[in-house]
Amino acid sequence: MRTFSRWLALAAWATGAAAYADNNDLRIWQLGNPDVNGTEPVLTADADFQAFARVMGAAITSVNLMPPETTGHSAWAVNAELSVVSLPDSVVIPMEDPQPSTVLIPSLHVRKGLPFSLELGGRVGYIERSSQVVGTGELKWAVNEGFTWLPDAGVRLHVTKLFGARDLNLTVWGLDFGVGKQFPLGGMVTLTPYGGLDLGFVGATSSRLDFRPERSLEESTGESSRAALEDTAAYRKVSFGDNMNQRLYGGVRFIGGVLQLGAELSLTRTGSVDVPTESGGTESRSLPAVFAFNTTLGMDF
């Protein structure tokens, strides 16, 4: 009996742990029911989901922290990074707790130089006070690097995905064009200012959501089982080709020996969305820009 009680207590603890939600965990059902046939439909729900996806996509791709030059054919770079990202209050980011004005995203960034001025990289970040992880893979090509009188120029292809968000699939593909110039300060010490334009293509889908979770067991079973499908819906898909963010960034990197230090500012324009009106038409609503400050500390060897 005592053994059974212990197993029962363990099961209860595990169930409670699974149901626990951190402050910044996303709860996208809070945007409302987009189904016009639902009990309490929200006319702007699909537009609000699109706006949320574009702003959240900008937030998780708001960092670069590297100039266009590569690490070199056989070199590695390992960096600990921190992003401080603004979350504009004019766009609803549905979270467990009230939406904060900024969110911290610490991350680990690893890059490896390849032949032909190519570089492969990966970044894993964590959204503070949440169970959500951000993963990025990238491939960079330095079109020009190392010339005395010419700036370095590079192109970077990257993809970022949000993991751990309930009922949400959010991915951003990006194409980044950067320029920079390395200046020697003596010996093995260099300073590299850089900047660029990053085009991010946002795609998002939701699971089918239940907007009436308080329904009784009788409504969901037996002869009235059709009631279990009432007040359930998925948001309209956010397509990559129709949702492009534009991120302008600038920063500086300092290298002394194997030590790397860097700081970067970025501003992402998130465009606009078409919002339905009560008259049956639509109106364009401009979305706010997302601002981020990023820092890095690492080694280049």
Image (cartoon, grey):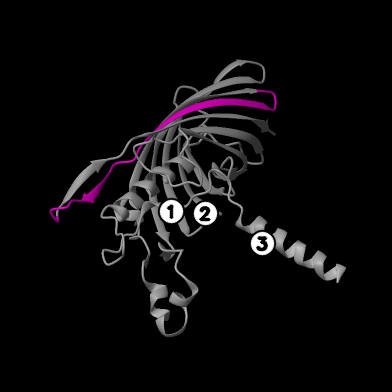
**Most foreground residue, 133 or 137:** 133
Q: Position of residue 195 (x, y in %)?
A: 43, 29
Give the amino acid at mark 2. Answer: Ala
Residue 165's tag is 2
Query: Which residue is rendered at x = 26% and y = 63% of the image?
Result: 36
Mark 2 or mark 1, whichever is nearer to me? 1
Picture layout, residue 16 above or below residue 244? below
Mark 2 touches mark 1? (CB < 8 Å): yes
Majority secondary structure in the magenta region: strand
Residue 15's tag is 3
Give the amino acid at mark 1. Answer: Ile
Mark 1 touches mark 3? (CB < 8 Å): no
Mark 2 or mark 3, whichever is nearer to me? 3
Residue 28's tag is 1
Q: Position of residue 254 (x, y in %)?
A: 59, 22
Q: Secondary structure at mark 2?
A: loop
Q: Position of residue 86 (x, y in %)?
A: 44, 33
Magenta segment includes 220: no
